Image: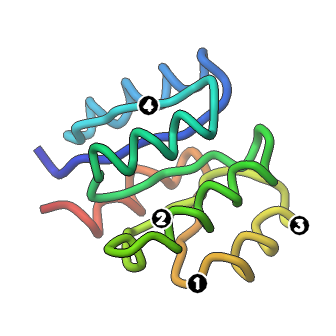
Amino acid sequence: MKGKLFLVILNPVEGEQTRQELIRAGWDVDVETDDHGAAYDFIMRERPDILVIDLNHQPAAARKVARSIRMEKGYENLSIVFVGGTLDERELAKAEIKGALFASHQELPRVLDQFAQ
């Protein structure tokens, strides 16, 4: 197992497809496909090694989850990878979430490999 990651993607079909791809790549994956608030609660309870957030669906709420997590004590350095999104959304996320990484859906497994344990 490469590590534990949490995937936030507000599209159940895409979420399950991405989850399965990441499991095949060797990751322990939990996913939230319905609610950014539920994602926040899960992350606070189950602290993953990496947080992967999709920017294709409700990007403002996705960025808010990342900002909120980073403000929590002990989560300041949680690795966050944003996936997808428009150029404008990626630029906003880059400005708001220092140290976050960005990937396309195709690049995601390769980008995550740098965090493998």
* Numbered disc 3: secondary structure: helix
Q: N-terminal of the two: label 4 or label 3?
A: 4
Label 1, on which residue? 98
Find residue 80 and name its label.
Answer: 2
Write the residue at 20% across / 40% down.
Answer: 26
Find residue 88 and name its label.
Answer: 3
Q: Nearer the viewer, mark 3 or mark 2?
A: 2
Task: Say what amino acid the circle numbered 2 marks.
Answer: Ile
Q: Are marks 1 and 4 in contact (CB under 8 Å)?
A: no
Front one among 66 and 14:
66
Task: Say what amino acid the circle numbered 1 marks.
Answer: Lys
Front one among 22 and 57:
57
* Numbered disc 2: secondary structure: strand
Write the residue at 77% across / 38% down.
Answer: 57
Q: Is residue 101 left or right of residue 26?
A: right
The part of the image, by quadrant, that contains residue 37 is: top right
* Numbered disc 4: secondary structure: strand
Q: Residues under labels 2 and 1: Cα distance?
A: 9 Å
Q: N-terminal of the two: label 2 or label 1?
A: 2
Write the residue at 70% across / 58% down.
Answer: 64
How crowded pointer 4 is (Cα within 10 Å; few <14, some 14-19, many 20+) is rated as: many
Q: Is residue 8 above or below residue 86?
A: above
Q: Residues under labels 1 and 4: Cα distance?
A: 23 Å
Q: Is residue 4 left or right of residue 59?
A: left
Label 4, on which residue? 31
Picture quarter with the C terminus = bottom left
Q: N-terminal of the two: label 4 or label 2?
A: 4
Q: Is residue 97 left or right of residue 49?
A: right
